[in-house]
Amino acid sequence: MDKFLYHRKLWEMNVKLLGESKVEKLKNSFVSRPRMSLWMIRAVTVLLLWSCFVHLMALGEMWGPRLFKGWPSCFNHHELSTAAEMTSLPTKIALPPKRVYVNNGYLMVSCNGGLNQMRAAICDMVTVARYLNVTLIVPELDKTSFWNDPSEFKDIFDVDHFIGSLRDEVRILKELPPRLKKRVELGMYHEMPPISWSNMSYYQNQILPLVKKHKVLHLNKTDTRLANNELPVEVQKLRCRVNFNGLKFTPQIEELGRRVVKILREKGPFLVLHLRYEMDMLAFSGCSHGCNPEEEEELTRMRYAYPWWKEKVINSELKRKDGLCPLTPEETALTLTALGIDRNVQIYIAAGEIYGGQRRMKALTDAFPNVVRKETLLESSDLDFCRNHSSQMAALDYLVALESDIFVPTNDGNMARVVEGHRRFLGFKKTIQLNRRFLVKLIDEYTEGLLSWDVFSSTVKAFHSTRMGSPKRRLVIPNRPKEEDYFYANPQECLQLLDEPLRVI
């Protein structure tokens, strides 16, 4: 009996213990759940409050009340400085509305020549595309010229700005739509060079039917394909708009240009000299005045090496006397001195490598000791991205030339003429248009002792006093477009002519 009672008590104690542990577990479960709920409520509340705070801050910034101005910021100093920098940036200009029209087809163009020859061609082809109501594909740049520059359009120009800023006039695409791209790959398109110096009726009557027939037309030569004169004013103004507003260089080139100008400006006024005394120009033109026999032979070999340079046998001295050669560095030094240019002015050389190097440059650097180039103003690493890319280097020179106090080209090539026209657009900035035929005759008389320095200098000054980039009418010579004034050198339809009367020179 005692044994039975003992086991019963032991069993009751176990049951009791088991019951108490279950009750404790149950209690704990009831306690933990409210705690979790409480934490969840707190977390959600904090998130909601923070969300409201952020939205209120945003509203405060948007609508302008200074409700939160002066509150302690929860952002670090770096974020604040970054925000300040961003607010100081210029606001993005709204794009013009797209022009709506019935698309007659697609126009592909391949530009030829150097940077400024291609620049003018691009302006012409945008204008042609607009008046034919066709979609223009971003132009392809010349990669087979003497300079052998592999640069694409996007490497030189801001392609998005080009497309967006002109979209109220013409639709421009970076590439053909896939279906048409396939057609081109299969050769199902038409290719041709348009006729030089043509008016809009040529494009309407002969080019437009080809676009409609083939859907894709490829114009494979585009330089000087629009006439200088006798075009509607709205056509001429569109050419200007593309040139002066639509074509911007890439931000990297623009920034480097600003840096060069800043370095020059810190030291005072500067003159940009487009000294086109480079090997390719001398070989192409046959101009070898001042060269030794070995150099003359080298230039002749180069001229024969390029089959598309049609003129092979050239009388250098005769060409020089006709004013068809770029001035030599020696002739340039005499001319600038005669014009009264301060010998201490900075002269920035906008050109490639001068033929003959320091030996040929000595007369110029002796007369003007502050001769500089982009390579001497910048670190070598600054030019790494555009080294061996002649068009990108030329773009940098173009920007510096636009900003100079005086621009002096020694040859009337494409850069000389396009920069001249752009400087006219910027307010008739001083551009000295040298008359080489007049100058070489005068220089020869001076060096032969037939003229005193005073007579030589006063004659040079008097002759060029009306050749400084001031307002004037373009010279028009019907049926002789190569001899008349180039549109891009003097786009008179687009210029504010100030108060000066126009005159023909």
Image (spheres, rainbow, N blue to C red):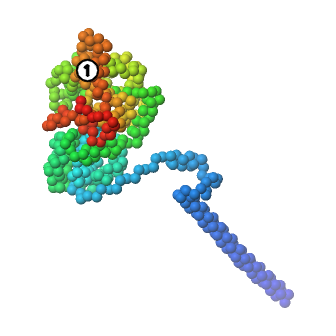
Q: Residue at x 25, y 53 (%)?
A: 135
Name the quarter where the N terminus is drawn: bottom right
- Mark count: 1
Residue 224, by quadrant, is top left
Type of the residue with mark 1: Leu
Compared to 474, does 464 lie above or below? above
Q: Nearer the viewer, residue 248 or 229?
A: 229
Name the quarter where the C terminus is drawn: top left
Residue 240, by quadrant, is top left
| Left or right of 149 on screen, residue 64 | right
Q: Secondary structure at mark 1?
A: helix
Residue 382, percent across and down?
43, 34
Compared to 277, does 223 lie above or below? below
Q: Residues within 10 Å of mark 1 (few under 14, many from 20)?
A: many
Q: Which residue is mark 1?
A: 439
Q: Is residue 91 visible?
A: yes
Q: Residue at x 22, y 46 (%)?
A: 232
Q: Is residue 387 visible?
A: no
Residue 372, percent across and down?
40, 25
Residue farthest to the top? 449
